[in-house]
Image (cartoon, rainbow, N blue to C red):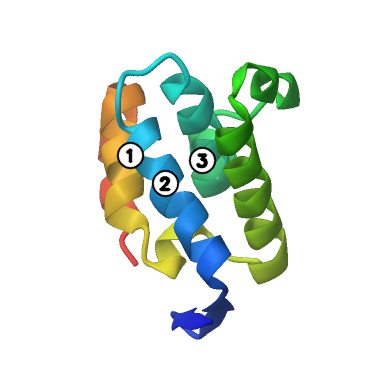
Amino acid sequence: MSEVRHIKVSPREHEAPSRLLPVAASETGQSRRVADFLLAWWNSGSYGAFDITTAWGLDAALAKDVITVFALAARCNNYPDTLGYGDEFKRVVHAWRPELSELTRARTP
């Protein structure tokens, strides 16, 4: 297990967001779905909530990573920027919510 910001994160928990974030920042058919999920974790009030039925459009590997990240978020009681993912999440905001990019300046770990 690795420790990020004093929270123990298993290799699987570390790898799942590391796989999802590049997808979320890109322009594939599933990118918006992954971005919506991740941004809901970071700040659902500002970046939007995640409709669980959106996951129906994810392939099995991405859905498994979403489940892993959901479990991590529920277990660690922290936002992703406190786990060291702040810069990657900012890229997702810039890709999918450019009108809200200014909000990311306030969310610096």
Mark 1 vs mark 3, foreground winner is 1
**If the image is split into quadrants, where does the C terminus sit?**
bottom left
Residue type highlighted by circle 1: Pro
Q: Quadrant location of residue 13?
A: bottom right
Q: Position of residue 107 (x, y in %)?
A: 35, 55
Q: Quadrant location of residue 71?
A: bottom right
Residue receiving disc 1: 22
Judged from the image, the secondary structure of the residue bearing numbered disc 2 is helix
Q: Which mark is residue 38?
A: 3
* CA separation in Å, label 2 and label 3: 12 Å
Q: Are marks 1 and 3 in contact (CB under 8 Å)?
A: no
Judged from the image, the secondary structure of the residue bearing numbered disc 3 is helix
Residue at 47% over, 20% down: 30
Residue type highlighted by circle 2: Arg
Q: Position of residue 70 (x, y in %)?
A: 67, 50
For this view, does 37 lie left or right of residue 14? right
Q: Position of residue 50 (x, y in %)?
A: 64, 29
Residue receiving disc 2: 19
Q: Residue 7 versus residue 42: which sits nearer the camera? A: 7
For this view, does 55 lie left or right of residue 105? right
Q: Is residue 43 above or below residue 49?
A: below
Q: Position of residue 67 (x, y in %)?
A: 68, 45
Residue type highlighted by circle 3: Leu
Is residue 12 shown to the viewer in this render?
yes
Give the mark, 2 or 3, whose residue is nearer the N terminus: 2
* CA separation in Å, label 1 and label 3: 11 Å
- Structural crowding at the residue carrying mark 1, measured as other residues with C-alpha within 10 Å and reported as few (<14), some (14–19) or many (≥20): some
